[in-house]
Amino acid sequence: MLLMLAAALSRFDVIGRHSVSTDGVLFDFQGVKITATVQGTASASAIMFKVGDKMPDNHFIVWVDGKRVAGTCAAAEFPNMDIEGNDIIEPPYKEDDLSACCAACNANDDCMAYSFNGGDGSCYLKRAAGKLTPNDGRISGLAVRAAAASFHTSGWPTGANNTVKIPLFAGLAADTSHEVVIEKSSEPAWNVPMIREPNYVGFVGFEGDAGMSYGDPPKASARRIEFLGDSITAGFCNQGQDLPETVFAESFESSWARRTCDSLQASCHTAAWSGFGMVEDYDGRGTTLASDMWKRTLATVNGDNDTHATRADNYWKFSSWVPDAVVINLGTNDGLGRRTELIPTFNATYLKLVLAAGEAYGDKTSFFLACGPMTNNYCDQVHWVIAKAKAAGVQAFFLDFVGLPHNCCGHPCAADDVVIGNFTAKTIAAQMGWDSVEIEQQVTDGLVETI
């Protein structure tokens, strides 16, 4: 039984920037959460689709009744690619097929990745997922424990008419209700500084047994925080430098922004994209900027014939979700230390954005403007913006990340993100009069297997 969107939209909760069309709930920002309570079914699947076939994969985390659903075998695969070195044993295993090689890796506590040779059945188990190199006939993959995803869009056909069925759970009691959460854990388009085409996904509905229905929708937290940032906020490389440099080395679930939300028990919206800056991007192309992205519902949908513009039907309606706090960390990619000529434009653009947000959200919203941890070359400009914003009546505060850890590819690792998240949560809590719960580590206990 498929509970379609039109009949059920009021029965589940969507947090994060999204739009609703006749095709489904459309979104591409990280951290978008779809939460529902289903009942009368022992199994359930999500019906989804993607739009865009030349952009990086998207990946998602699923929770069922509070337990994180482990990825299927394999959690991430790379056709015609080999993983160099890190072999656990020599000679390699001999397995009948790819799935048997993957299963052997997942059964070995030391195995984080594998490479399978379809020609002779050689199965190379790897203690670390190192550099990927082209090799026809090889298929490499990450063990479930190594991938920051419950499922991903690799191999999905493109277009709203090409829906995909994703199993979420099976074998649970049908006579009780089950809370299901699907969260997008990758950024709008991983490591893509130029938007070539849209890269969004659509959620159509849940499918389950014949008697499935929705229970009361879960109650969202009354606290609201919005984040605007770049790779530091997105969680770029936070799964560690031993993983191949792909989208699977990134997990927004482990990011400092997500940890801040967990600590403060807040509902959060996030708009973050690696390589983007306030007035220039890392490569100096400046085709689309974070200050452009902030205006959009779908980040990867450009304006007509203008990469800085936003289509009229894609403007985010700021009055639809008013945050208590806005956290911005932009400036690293602008490179003001080597592009000093950009400082006046950076200051003016940043201040204009904060003032526009303040006007849209009202005087009860507080702004926390960060600098660091990868560089301090924009801290003076952030202080200038804060002073001007305060003079205009905006509640603005400095968030000092300088000196906080960033040990993975020059970015914060997951463990570093915990430190930064706790620091951010305490700073916000002190200003807002909120309580916070210190997050000590990434929660990985209670994994349940999907089907």
Image (spheres, grey):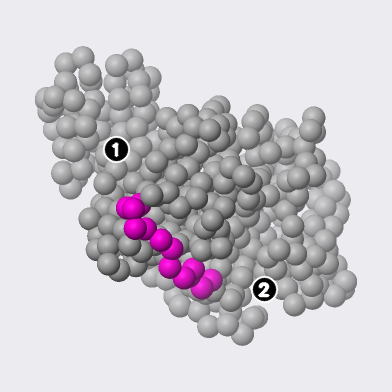
- How packed mark 1 is, by other alpha carbons closer than 10 Å (few <14, some 14-19, many 20 or more), is many
| Magenta stretch contains residue 231 | no
Identify whether 256 is placed above or below 243: below
In this rendering, position of residue 171 left or right of residue 295: left
**Secondary structure under the numbered disc 2 in the rendered image:** loop
- How packed mark 2 is, by other alpha carbons closer than 10 Å (few <14, some 14-19, many 20 or more), is some
Give the residue displayed 62% in from the left and 44% down from the top: 22
State the image coordinates of residue 148 (x, y, percent, origin top left): 38, 48
**Secondary structure under the numbered disc 1 in the rendered image:** loop
State the image coordinates of residue 119 (x, y, percent, origin top left): 21, 14
State the image coordinates of residue 28 (x, y, percent, origin top left): 58, 45
In the image, what residue type sits under mark 2?
A: Asp
In this rendering, position of residue 103 left or right of residue 12: left
Any part of residue 258 in sight: no
Q: What's the mark number on residue 17?
A: none
Residue to which mark 2 is pinned: 324
| Magenta stretch contains residue 209 | yes
Characterize the magenta stretch by its predominant secondary structure.
loop
Residue to which mark 1 is pinned: 74
The answer to which image quadrant residue 199 occupies is top right
The residues bearing labels 2 and 1 have C-alpha atoms spaced at a distance of: 40 Å
Segment tinted magenta in the rendering: 208-220
Identify whether 381 is placed above or below 119: below
In the image, what residue type sits under mark 1?
A: Ala
In this rendering, position of residue 181 left or right of residue 444: right
Give 86 or 275, whichever is nearer the viewer: 275
Give the residue displayed 71% in from the left and 48% down from the top: 296
